[in-house]
Image: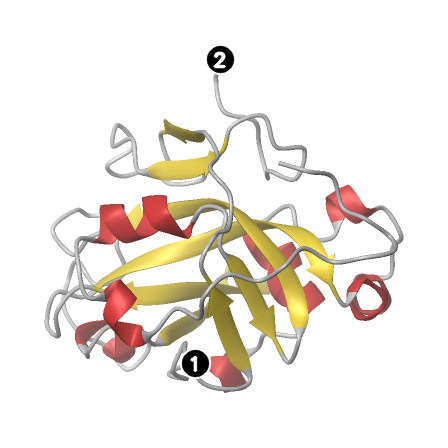
Amino acid sequence: MAPVSKTSTPRLGKALKRGFFDRDVREVAHDLIGATMLVDGVGGIIVEVEAYHHTEPAAHSYNGPTPRNQIMFGPPGFAYVYRSYGIHWCVNFVCEAAGSASAVLIRALEPTHGLAAMRRRRHLQEVHALCSGPGKLTEALGITIAHNTLPLDRPPIALHARTEDLEVATGIRIGITKAVELPWRYGVKGSKFLSKPFPK
């Protein structure tokens, strides 16, 4: 993938509609790699995600609906935002038909739009560190619980399909203790913007 340019931003692909998310969560996760995510015009290229399905115990929906995860049980194409370890927000995209309660966690972005705002929010200049983790990217994009349940195809959120071919790496998910063997982490192979490199 081309490096971030200080003078121009990559062109955007077609807008992704909610129907994009109405299919197998692993397919959606794979196809989100290389897509662009913007919140109020700030964001970048998705370089790392993880898929979570209600049938496996690492998913928040595994034990059924709660006030926190209720949005996961609704129709696809909405944001699920939760606080991780009481410290930072994480943003997920709800997938599959209503009742499936599956979602894709957005783990890392390559910043391309609104770098000044991201640097101000993150209090740092290093572009590779702005969005290299789920909590970092939500801080950089200004995502909070206020974005929970919002549609993914209406302002302030915008998603655009990838515009170039790229090699997608897969591996086991990070920072979980259940269903650790599932290879449901996806990312841009060799990207410098990942939260953690994929095994070679």
Residue 159 percent across, percent down from the top left: 48, 68
Q: Is residue 100 left or right of residue 66?
A: left
Disc 2 packing (10 Å; few <14; some 14–19; many ≥20): few
Q: Disc 2 residue type?
A: Lys
Residue 181 percent across, percent down from the top left: 26, 27
Disc 1 packing (10 Å; few <14; some 14–19; many ≥20): some
| Tag 1 residue | 148
Residue 166 percent across, percent down from the top left: 48, 34
Q: Which of these two is toward me, 177 or 146?
A: 146
Q: Which mark is residue 139?
A: none
Q: Residue at x 25, y 54 (%)?
A: 59
| Tag 2 residue | 200
Earlier residue among tags 1 and 2: 1
User: Please, what secondary structure does the residue beneath circle 1 have?
Assistant: loop
Q: Residue at x 58, y 25 (%)?
A: 190
User: Please, what secondary structure does the residue beneath circle 2 have?
Assistant: loop
Does 151 sit above or below residue 159?
below
Does 168 sit above or below residue 27?
above
Q: Is residue 156 left or right of residue 136?
A: left
Residue 162 percent across, percent down from the top left: 48, 52
Q: CA distance from mark 1 to mark 2?
A: 35 Å
Q: Which of these two is toward me, 122 or 19?
A: 19
Q: Does any portion of residue 151 appear in the rendered image?
A: yes
Q: Disc 1 residue type?
A: Asn
Q: Is residue 159 left or right of residue 142?
A: left
